[in-house]
Amino acid sequence: MMAVRPRDKQPSGPDENTDNILPQGVASVLAVLPSSAVVLGRDDRVLRASSAARAFGLVKGDQLTAAELLALARQVRRSGEIQESEIEVAGNRFGVEPTTFAVRVAPLGTHGQVLVLAEDQTERRRVEAVRRDFVANVSHELKTPVGALSLLAETVQDAADDPVAVTRFSGRMQHEAARLTYLVQDLITLSRIQGGEPIPTPGRVPVDEVVHEAIDRCGTRASAKEISLVAGGTEGLRVWGDDELLVTALRNLIDNAVAYSPENTRVVVCARAVGDTVEVSVSDQGIGIPESSLERIFERFFRVDPARSRATGGTGLGLAIVKHVAVAHGGEVTVWSKEGSGSTFTLRLPAFGGAAMAVPDSTTNSLEAAQ
């Protein structure tokens, strides 16, 4: 009997699964890439996608959702050349802001596969926008006192024969120079603490000393408006941090309270222990803050009433400094305010040793008693 030879296997056609097989090692590389990575087959189906790509909504099932990316991938497949671009993808949930990606698309292998890499640039864009706004705001704030000093200097020169005018305009020059000094000092302080650097030499800080030092530095301005500065609450509390930064933060809160309070009123600074934190509050009887502005008052250069703020000599950086000092100490700052009823700013800080305990035989005064 004649043996029958098995038929030889015919070569695979172009539609075979070879087009959907990733080149050796590609899957391992994609797994460690920090970028969102997607591999498309010849038919534009997703062969492999990183978890980041799916989380950002670039891929759904086996389809690429961003039309711009798909068009770019097809262009690369036709030309065989690497393409780079920047695209914006809408958030996959309501209220989520669009995400900006720096995209690089390249051919992969010889079967029409395409590699798509997308790097999230949203945070970088936000930082750049903040930096531009900050530079613009600083330029504007510096321009005002510098311009005023220039005009006042010319006026003094023209009024050299009038001693009364010279005295008056010299006083204005001193005022503008002081305002410029405060602004530069606040900028230096803010740049030092907002970089996320740890406090250089933290230590045990007595809250009483911080309160009394801050009140002492604000005494002259408060006396000019006949505003009483009163310290109350629990004595002997300790926090962990930098005493000078804490004095700066509390001074800014007290200065703010004095600036927006009418004459013959009272500003109360009260310290108390709450669990493993220490709360230092500054309460005034001032004009209050509109509810619509409460969420923005800790922004740099934000002013509820720009005209009034400049009249009081504020730099617009005080509350931003307070927020960054609180964060640098592992704490927070909050505000309660009602128009016409005053405001209360509360600085919450971790207690020294993890427990907000006063020293023995300390005297406790309630806020009501202080008032």
Image: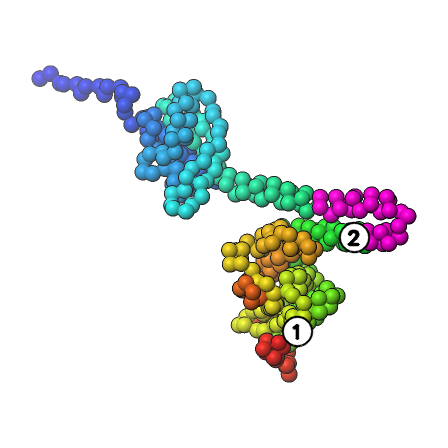
Quarter occupied by residue 341: bottom right
Name the one closer to the observer, 95 or 273: 95
- In the figure, 34 relative to 246: above or below? above
Q: Which residue is mark 1?
A: 231
- In the figure, 111 relative to 146: above or below? above
Q: Residue 13 — which label?
A: none
Task: Find numbered disc 1 in the image and state the secondary structure of the residue it sits on.
Answer: strand
| Image x and y of residue 214, in percent | 70, 66
Write the residue at 36% across / 37% down.
59
Name the one closer to the observer, 319 or 55: 319
Q: Which residue is mark 2?
A: 172
Image marks 2 and 1: residues in contact by CB distance under 8 Å:
no
Write the residue at 33% across / 34% down.
63
Magenta residue span? 143-170
- In the figure, 356 relative to 288: above or below? below
Write the residue at 60% across / 60% down.
326
| Image x and y of residue 232, in percent | 63, 75
Residue 152 magenta:
yes
Q: CA distance from mark 2 to mark 1?
A: 33 Å
| Dominant secondary structure, magenta | helix
Q: Is residue 122 left or right of residue 187?
A: left
| Image x and y of residue 100, in percent | 47, 37
